[in-house]
Image (cartoon, rainbow, N blue to C red):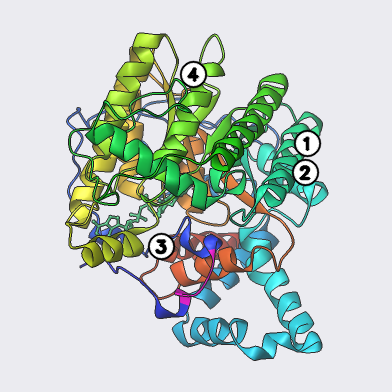
Amino acid sequence: MANKVVCPKLLKNLGFHVRRLNSAPSPLSAVPPLSFTGDFNATTVTTPNLVDTVPHINTVPEKNNIINFDDVKELFYGVPTSKLIRSSLTLQMAAIDPMVDMGMWVMNSKLMEMPIFREVMLGFVKNTFYEHFCAGKDLTEVRRTVSKLSDGGLKAMLDYGVEHATNNESCEQSMKAFIQTIESTKSLPQSSTSFVVVKITAICTPRLLKRMSDLLRWEHKDPSFNLPWKQRTLPLFAESSPLYHTWKKPEPLTVEEERDLQLAHERLTKICEKCLEHDVPLLIDAEDTTIQPGIDYMAYSAAIKYHKDDGPLIFGTIQAYLKDAKERMAIAKKAAEKMGVPMGFKLVRGAYMCSERELASRLGFQSPIHDSIEQTHACFNSCAEFMIEEIANGSGAVVLATHNIESGKLAATKAIDMGIKDSEKLQFAQLYGMAEGLTFGLRNAGFQVSKYLPFGPVDQIMHYLMRRAEENRGMLSTSAFDRQLMRKELGRRLKVATS
Ligand SMILES: Cc1cc2nc3c(=O)[nH]c(=O)nc-3n(C[C@H](O)[C@H](O)[C@H](O)COP(=O)(O)OP(=O)(O)OC[C@H]3O[C@@H](n4cnc5c(N)ncnc54)[C@H](O)[C@@H]3O)c2cc1C
């Protein structure tokens, strides 16, 4: 069956939180044949070793069954029945198309301007989608969520939900919120936080990032072009990188822009120093290609300055749906190695497919996105394979951020083949409230798995929530597999209770 690629009209006018982390539903059946080159007769895990609330980690290998989805008792071990019922109902609700359509319509309507109506709606959202997809409104609530995850053998990636910054003042506010988030990790259970997440667009305005990206692209076209503000960084482009966004020589940064860039660097420096002090790595999200060279530039400059002796502290993000992803990642990785810098990447498929395709077509260029979903899958799997091999050779780290079951299985198999398992260097991540089956399956197989936890007041992350509802809508949505697993486990528990 063809993959459903959604560029919903409904979401056209929504802000940053809608566009980022957006992905269309992907029925499991749509995933193409596996493309790792390794041997998939690898082995795993099955003997239970129950430890309090921490689910048991399999220890005895079993052929071709790295992630075990068949034993739902094992899969949902430690998940309270009340949570299973609530999650199941919320995901079921999101699968009913007319319900999601109506919810979207109401949320975007003038009705939301009526205080009482707004209160009622926000209350409903809070008790359903918000509870399911968000970690809480503030750090106190987040702490509870993180503790529960930690009890269940999972780690947390703390993502304070902020909008794009518009000026230096909003950049400063975001920086303070990120720093508070990093500081909060000291009061959390030890090793319960795998990362704090930062969006560069919250500490440096997208306008300035676009100017920098244009200048960096021009420098790549013409290496004699001088960028006086440029710090030491890693290669940002590959041979195959598209440069069409910048079709004429950009004006140099003004004195004011250079000063703003300096301030942005200082903000990132403060964040990195806090991360170093609290020994918590930083994950920098990827956004769209108009500004991504600027984001990569800042991420890589920071990664060169701040790293641990035994591994990376700052992780950039590679979007595998981009045709040049693999080449760019390999070049940056190699350059880092030459400098003696341990490099970490988060690998995702990418969330801006519709806007990227639209922009390229408007400018009369070929889309930077792979022409088919199969090519994207192949690129993701190949990048994952590359990084797993690098890790096995003692270099770098990767976070495989995906809900795709086949990519999860492939990477797990490859990792076991290469002798990597419970290692900080290879981590998996899924969004909170999504792909629970994959999360628990990977955890039970002995891998380090995190949930990406957006938090903030309900109205502040409403757009993020609407995107999650959109993503999970329809009977063939990303959550269909999870709903099926949860129903099976609820049925099993009911049987046990009534027998
Ligand atoms: C922890 C975490 C962090 C994330 N951080 C970021 C981030 O920083 N930046 C970012 O951009 N995204 C981020 N994402 C979102 C991610 O990019 C995906 O949108 C989302 O995870 C779905 O991809 P998947 O790997 O889960 O695979 P699947 O569930 O298999 O989804 C595949 C989807 O890929 C899309 N797709 C990609 N290429 C094509 C193509 N050529 N043709 C058709 N469809 C295509 C389609 O929408 C398709 O449904 C993150 C996701 C997670 C889980």
Local SS, label 2: helix
* Residue 143, label in figure: 2
Give the quadrant of the N terminus: bottom left
Q: Is residue 444 left or right of residue 174?
A: left
* Tag nearer the camera, 2 or 4: 4
* Spatial CA span between label 3 and label 2: 28 Å
Q: Are marks 4 and 3 in contact (CB under 8 Å)?
A: no
* Residue 498, label in figure: none
* Tag nearer the camera, 1 or 2: 1
* Residue 478, label in figure: 3
Q: Position of residue 254 (x, y in %)?
A: 51, 41
* Tag nearer the camera, 4 or 1: 4
Helix, strand or loop for the magenta stretch, by majority = loop
Give the quadrant of the C terminus: bottom right
* Amino acid carrying mark 4 in the image: Ile
Residues rendered magenta in the picture: 11-15
